Image (cartoon, rainbow, N blue to C red):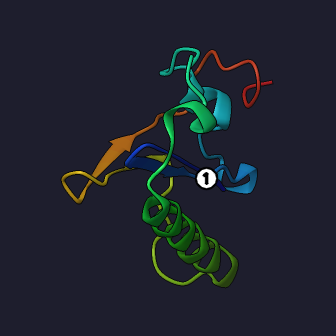
Amino acid sequence: MSGAAIRTEGQVFWVLPSEQSACYECFSQFYQEQELSCHQAGVMSPVVGIIGNLQALEAIKILTHFGTPLRNTLLVFDGMQSEWIKLKVDKSATCRVCNV
């Protein structure tokens, strides 16, 4: 389970090899190297709680086989607009991590 927060934004993504899900490498290919850290840019503390709560919910769904976990989905939170964006992350056919 991956969760991140910076400024007023956050994201959640999980990798579960037994589900043949896209891996972190498949997902991270869409991002360039970041120049700012949370220490430099800051983070609005409630965003960390929102992201952490969603991580906990997704982990419970995965562990208990309850509901439908967000498979191959990057969920992005925009705290300024209080909106969620779902982005589909396909498993890359050329991924050097999960297609070995």
Which residue bears the numbered disc 1? 14
Front in this rendered view, residue 36 or 71: 36
Q: Position of residue 99 (x, y in %)?
A: 73, 26
Q: Quadrant of the N terminus?
A: bottom right
Could one spot residue 23 in this view of the protein?
yes
Q: Position of residue 78 (x, y in %)?
A: 29, 49
Tell me: residue 34, above or below residue 51. Answer: above
Residue 57 falls in image quadrant: bottom right
55 with respect to 9 (left or right): right
Task: Identify residue type, mark 1.
Answer: Trp
Residue 40 falls in image quadrant: top right
Residue sitting at 44 percent across and 54 percent down? 44
Tell me: residue 42, above or below residue 63. Answer: above
Residue sitting at 57 percent across and 16 percent down? 35
Residue 93 falls in image quadrant: top right
Asked which secondary structure carries label 1, the reply is loop
Front in this rendered view, residue 89 or 4: 4
Q: Quadrant of the C terminus?
A: top right
Tell me: residue 40, above or below residue 32. Answer: below
95 with respect to 67 (left or right): right
43 with respect to 22 (left or right): left
Front in this rendered view, residue 77 or 41: 41
**Within-10-Å neighbours for mark 1: few <14, some 14–19, many 20+:** many
